[in-house]
Amino acid sequence: MPMTVDQRLLEILVCPQTKQRVHEAGVDLMERVNQAVAAGTLKNQGGETVRDPIPEGLVREDGGVLYPVRDDIPVMLLDEAIPLEDLN
């Protein structure tokens, strides 16, 4: 599935915490993220369990977090970011 975030926007987006660039999450990563959502084991940085599937995401350059993209809009809020370190 092609990314729906405008390419010009993607070129200027950075992580609000580290200022690292972000890039599109791959299909394999999004499958793992959504498996964790379905299992009820995925939490965002705010500590809340993520209950809704995430159709797309942007990954910080270091691979540490994923920012969800909902309705073609990147959600670049620190509490909504998904830490990827514990994702199986």
Image (tube, rainbow, N blue to C red):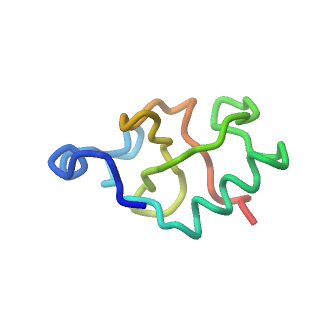
Residue 82: image x %, image y %? 60, 45
Residue drawn at the location 64% of the way across and 62% of the way down:
31
How many numbered marks does the figure carry? 0
Residue 55 percent coordinates (x, y): 53, 47
Q: From this viewpoint, which residue is outermost toward the left?
A: 8
- Residue 68 versus residue 13: which sits nearer the camera? 68
| Residue 29 image offset from top left, x and y in percent | 58, 65
Q: Residue at x 15, y 48 (%)?
A: 8
At a point 30% along the width and 46% down the height, the residue shown is 5
Q: Quadrant of residue 60?
A: bottom left
**Percent position of residue 39, x then y:** 84, 49
Relative placement, left or right, of 77 versus 85 is: left
- Residue lying at 46% horizontally and 35% vertically, measured from the top left: 70
What quarter of the picture does the N terminus occupy? bottom left
Name the side, left or right, on which 50 lies relative to 24. right
Residue that protrudes farthest toward the front in the picture: 1
Compared to residue 17, the image places residue 32 above or below, namely below
The one nearer the camera, 46 or 28, is: 28
Q: Quadrant of residue 64?
A: bottom right
Q: Report whether 17 appears left or right of 49.
A: left
